[in-house]
Amino acid sequence: MQGKLHLIPVNMTLLCLTACICQNLYAETGSTEPVLLPTLKIEATRTDTDWLKTPASVYRIDQDNNKNNLGVNLSETLKGVPGLQLNNRENYAQDLQISMRGFGARSTFGVRGIRLYVDDIPATMPDGQGQTSNIDLGSLDHIEVLGGPFSSLYGNSSGGTILTTTKQGEGRDSIQLGYSGGSHDKGRADIVLQGGADQPNEPSYVVSSSYFDTDGYREHSAAKKVLSNAKLTWDLDDGSKVNWIVNHVDINADDPQGLTRAQWKANPKQQVPFLKQFDVRKEINQTQTGLIWSKPINDQHELYAMLYAGHREVTQYQSIPKGEASPELGLDDKGNPIPSSSQQNPRHAGGVIDFSRDFYGTDLRWTGKDLLPNTRLTAGLAFDYMHEDRQGYENFDSKGQYGVKGNLRRDEKNSLWNLDPYVQASWEFLPAWRLDTGLRYSNVHYESKDAYFKAAEYPADRDNGDDSGKKDYQKLLPSAALTWEITPQLSTYMSYAKGFETPTFTEMAYPTVGTSGINFDLNPATSDNYELGLKSQNRFGHFTAAVFQSETQNDIVSAESNNGRNTFRNADKTLRQGAELSWNKKLWRDLTAQASYSFIDATFDADIPNTDPVKVVAKGNYIPGVAKNQAFVALAWQPETGLNAGLDVRYIDKLYVDDINSDAAPSYTITSANVGYIWKNADWKVRTFARVDNLFDEEYVGSVIVNDGNGRFFEPADGMNWSAGLSITKAF
């Protein structure tokens, strides 16, 4: 593996050594007795190991330690995880932009390249497209973030994996009522009902619902969101456990879109005046349910089954002008008709996206323990299916009024399915050595049936014919990891895995300008992923260090973004390499400290030739949207009751806006502070909080729209802003 790893800058080595030394500065003094720290069991890798022996970069975040905030965005909770970049667009129509070690940075909508799960149920669509909007932070127990090679165990589109787990009802029945508000007329009201089982075979329950609305930081960025979640849990007499989860989310959000650099500097709150006429917005409605059953047959055999189903509807109004068709377009230098990019082109899909999806799937798994000495074997089969009914409409009516649904311009039915068998094996072949291996056959099958046909009106145009088609992708994904327990408090590991990422329907939806139908020319991306890591858990705290490298072929990258419509292409080779550091410790009583740092060198590893209007991308250019350096430091005083407070500082390096690195959003450092109070008395609990984000009113860009064709790359973030809230809990 060392032969494959490119050189990491020397300053990274120095930083690792410094972090190790600095642990001693925060050590508790006056005692030579070892401090017994709680064992952290890790579920993400399915290997039944504790954190220290897990051969992967995995981080666990307890939600109870992240209560002093609005509880709307996942970025409020995960901002301290190294290698994980969360960009808040201040745009609820497009959701958070999340990338892990550079994977997912190209996403202009939702989450790509990273798989999301809630209670083992996929929050990522079968095609690889995900959103965080259906994750209810108010009912979460903890989150696990899995990066690096081991993430490939989850199959397609797993450059990283985020697994959230909701609370299980326990104890007496209780009701919690809460309200929080903040800058820009933000308001969130929520209710949580929970209770444990009174009798064997009876369910415990957690039911939550919230309403959030805001006028938005920028012009035309108002949003409303209704989120409801329910979880019932049965612990049965025969040892089996059943979880039933139901989730529903409604979002209506305006989209302010991006700004040029000059527009951002002049007024970061503005929407481009030209765009106001289009009333760009998105409506999302999603319902999902899942059932999880697990049962130990005996000491050696265990069964697991997960079933899920869901329905999703999206309507999005874009800022595409209707344009004009012209009979004078003529021919290009190769004698081909020059296409018209206007909606008058018979092949144009219109300026309104309207689709509904039905999706479902299952994951069946058997685990055998000690069938051979010191071994654990898992074999499973995962199946997912999605059917999409997609239409496109003109975004104007007969009078030329924008922001309304006009004539039909696209009508197709798309489907996708996969059937992935997989195996995992663990073997402790020596007292201090452990080998983990895995193998997954990932296969994805796309099909599109086109029902929209229109003849060309001008000689320079072509007919919109039958664009039906299908394409299959498949890849065998091996993984292997070797762990050495140097001491009971210190371990090291090295791992390798093959990664696989197919294009989503969103990425395939639009080929190049002037063509129609699904872009079946996109190839899947494949990666060779390497990692070397070190972990320690002792009286100096929890410390991790990891170096990594990902070599990707046919990486799916953004070709162009124009008026809210995006096209994609393959890059021959890309390279991501870097390092991660993380440390946390309870310093004294209820005072805790946390620090993390990540270095990511993400570049194109081969030239991309010119494809008009996209310019040549030279080898060595940085992949846009990826921060090279990222750091986080936090102090928190978190007693069980009474006064609590916290302070954190986050640094993000500059973000290039396009493949040719023509411009970049500047680096920034923001500070946040919070204070709260918890009061308990018998059956009552009262929690209050107040916080200030961007304490020093830093002017910065929250995220960038990669390769925007109009130069409107920048999505400004909020200046200094505040929030406060109150919740009251009563037990019965």
Image: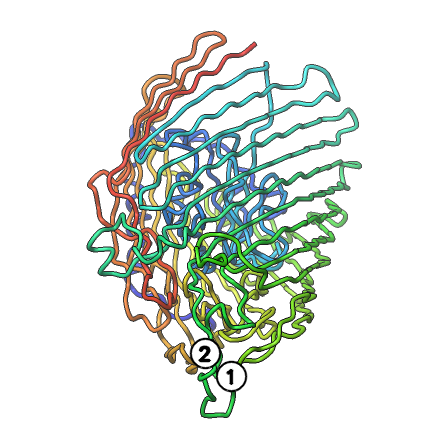
Q: Quadrant of the C terminus?
A: top right
Task: Please name whichever residue, 662 or 67, is drawn nearer the observer in this view of the structure.
Answer: 662
Q: Does any portion of residue 552 appear in the rendered image?
A: no
Residue 183 % position (x, y): 30, 34
Foreground: disc 1 or disc 2: 2
Task: Please name whichever residue, 1 or 348, is drawn nearer the observer in this view of the structure.
Answer: 348
Q: Which mark is residue 552?
A: none
Q: Which mark is residue 326?
A: 2
Q: Are marks 1 and 2 in contact (CB under 8 Å)?
A: yes
Q: Does any portion of residue 488 appear in the rendered image?
A: yes
Q: Amino acid at mark 2?
A: Ser
- The answer to which of marks 1 and 2 sits earlier in the sequence is 2
Q: Is 414 above or below relative to 314?
A: below
Q: Badge 2 local density, few (<14 within 10 Å), some, or many (20+)?
A: some
Q: Which residue is mark 1?
A: 460
CA distance separating discs 1 and 2 = 8 Å
Residue at image position (54%, 65%) is: 349
Q: Amino acid at mark 1?
A: Ala
The answer to which image quadrant residue 102 occupies is bottom left
Q: Is 506 above or below relative to 487?
A: below
The secondary structure type at the circle numbered 2 is loop
Q: Is residue 605 left or right of residue 20?
A: right
Extreme residue in the front direction:
399
Q: Is residue 388 left or right of residue 457?
A: right
